[in-house]
Image (tube, grey):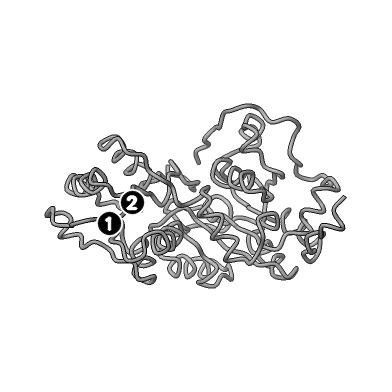
Amino acid sequence: MSTRTTTGTKAPGNPARTGAAVAPELAKRLARVHGVMFDIDGCLLLADQPSGYGGTVLPGALEALEAVRATGRNFVCFTNGSFQTPSAIATTLRELGLEVRDDQVMTPAVVAAETMATRYPGGRVMVFGGEGVTEPFAARGVQMVDQDQALAGRAGEVAAVVVGWDIEFGREKIVAAAEAVLAGAELYTTSAAPTFASHERLNVGVSGFIAAGLTHVTGRPYKVLGKPSAEAFGAICSRTGAQPEEILVVGDDLRMEAGMARAHGALGVLMTTGTNSREDAGEAGVEQTPDLILDSLEELAALLQEHGAPMPAPTDEETP
């Protein structure tokens, strides 16, 4: 398992640690949590393939999901991988003993498809990736450019290029994508995560690697639509029916999960079971500092149970 260290301006103070009672203000925030986002790789399970295939469930994962349900909260499982479709990932999780419905799984390809459908209605989008990427676009009626036409240089006007998990991305696709971007298409990627937490072998991110290469070729920047983007966080709020301050983001990556929580006013929990450690958190900048650091999801389950059902946010009259 590989650890990526983050750098930046060191945050004042320390986030709450394992085994200690949380501070009153943090307890109030936990009690007001309505929606919980669980990362998958390095948080719910460890595997050497993205999104849980062939993985091992981490201790406390089942208890944490049950605690969310028992306290009347909603949850989503959000991986930054787009190798598999949400339904395939949900099936894998259920086979591993985790009770997760298909609609409780999110991938950045889903966020990308929803964003393209809203941002470029009726526009043509060049999408790179396998079924895990293309299925969400087809389900939402996004007009995808025919790959054969694109590779032959007959794609025509393209509004956007979206790069997902495409292990067959070679020179011809580089040319087709670069031509579209240079002609004015916006460049997006489903994820720029360099690695995913894994069981034994290095689990590298493909999408960001390709997008960075296209930026190198074209000189045009790319936009990330997966975690920690505003688009991804907005989709989490929509799925859980919660306001930003009512969201609890649980993950193992300071940049992807803790950073997203911090940027959008949510509550962030770093699990030390994957990419980043306590030491990493101690050296992280303010923008990536988690509110809690936990060593197992059993601890999270206990905290959710302890602080009961979610409380309504205070009204203006109640706010001091």
Front-most of residues 231 and 194: 231
Question: How far apart are the two marked residues, 1 and 2, measured between alpha carbons?
Answer: 8 Å
> Is 304 left, or right, of 241 in this rendering?
right
Front-most of residues 257 and 99: 257
Q: Disc 2 designates what residue?
A: 163
Task: Name the spot of residue 134 as percent of width and height, x first.
Answer: 33, 63
Query: Which disc is residue 126 wearing?
Result: 1
Q: Secondary structure at mark 1?
A: strand
> Is 94 left, or right, of 137 in this rendering?
right
> Is 160 left, or right, of 308 in this rendering?
left
> Is 281 left, or right, of 42 in this rendering?
right
Q: Residue at x 57, y 60 (%)?
A: 236
What amino acid is found at the position of numbered circle 1 in the picture?
A: Met
Front-most of residues 42 and 218: 218
Quadrant of the image occupied by residue 218: top left
Quadrant of the image occupied by residue 240: bottom right
